[in-house]
Amino acid sequence: MRTRWEEIKALEKTARGDSAAPKTLLSGIAAALPALLRAHHIGTRAASVGFDWARAEDVVEKIQEEVNELREVVDGPADPARAEEEMGDLLFAIANLARHLGIEPETALRKANDKFTRRFGTLERTVAESGRTMHQMSLEELEQEWQRAKTHE
């Protein structure tokens, strides 16, 4: 519904001769939006004209394709520019999966950040109570504490 409202507003601006009216379907999406939210809006606009995956499962396949391309970069010689490009493609595909599932990706990521922060705080307290520091612990020991933090939630 929001996409349709934006389309109607764009048509009204064009009818008024407003020079600031969007010239393309995607040009009216604010570049200042958080990137994940902007990707969501871009996908919504593209979908409004039928340029979209038919099913969420199709987006999952696209995500797997992007993961495979990123894996090639990680496993190969260092190429920061290509790594950034492939990571961007993966994040864009994930934003589109969120859209297909009816999930606002910024909200989902914010909740995941909060959950990680809570669990990491629990991990820090547990380690401090043991009299050790995180730097003194192996990754395996930290992982054990992490799993305990997850089960205490």
Image (cartoon, rainbow, N blue to C red):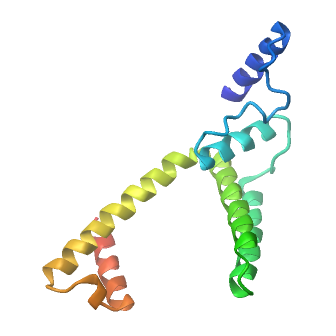
Q: Position of residue 71 (x, y in %)?
A: 71, 79
Res 45 visible: yes
Quarter of the image holding residue 32?
top right
Q: How far across and down, in percent of the image, does residue 122 sit?
A: 25, 69
Q: How many marks?
A: 0
Which residue reaches farthest top? 16
- In the picture, residue 48 is in which quadrant? top right
Of residues 152 and 66, the one drawn nearer to the viewer in this rendering = 66
* Horizontal relation, residue 69 to residue 37: left or right: right
In the displayed structure, would residue 9 be above or below residue 81?
above
Q: Relative to residue 125, is residue 137 drawn left or right? A: right
Q: Examine the image and state in which quarter residue 129 appears.
A: bottom left
Q: Which residue is found at the position 70% from the left and 21% from the top?
A: 5
Q: Nearer the viewer, residue 73 or 104?
A: 73
For the point 20% across and 72% down, which residue is it?
125
When the figure is inspected, residue 151 is found, relative to residue 50, above or below; the finding is: below
At a point 56% along the width and 44% down the height, the residue shown is: 104
Place of residue 22 in the rendered image (x, y in percent of width and height, measured from the top left): 80, 26
- Position in image of residue 25 (x %, y %): 82, 32
Residue at 32 percent of width and 67 percent of height: 119
> Left or right: 48 with respect to 74?
right
Q: Specify the quadrant that holds the C terminus.
A: bottom left
Is residue 152 among the parts visible in the rendering? no
Q: Is residue 123 above or below residue 39?
A: below
Q: Quadrant of the N terminus?
A: top right
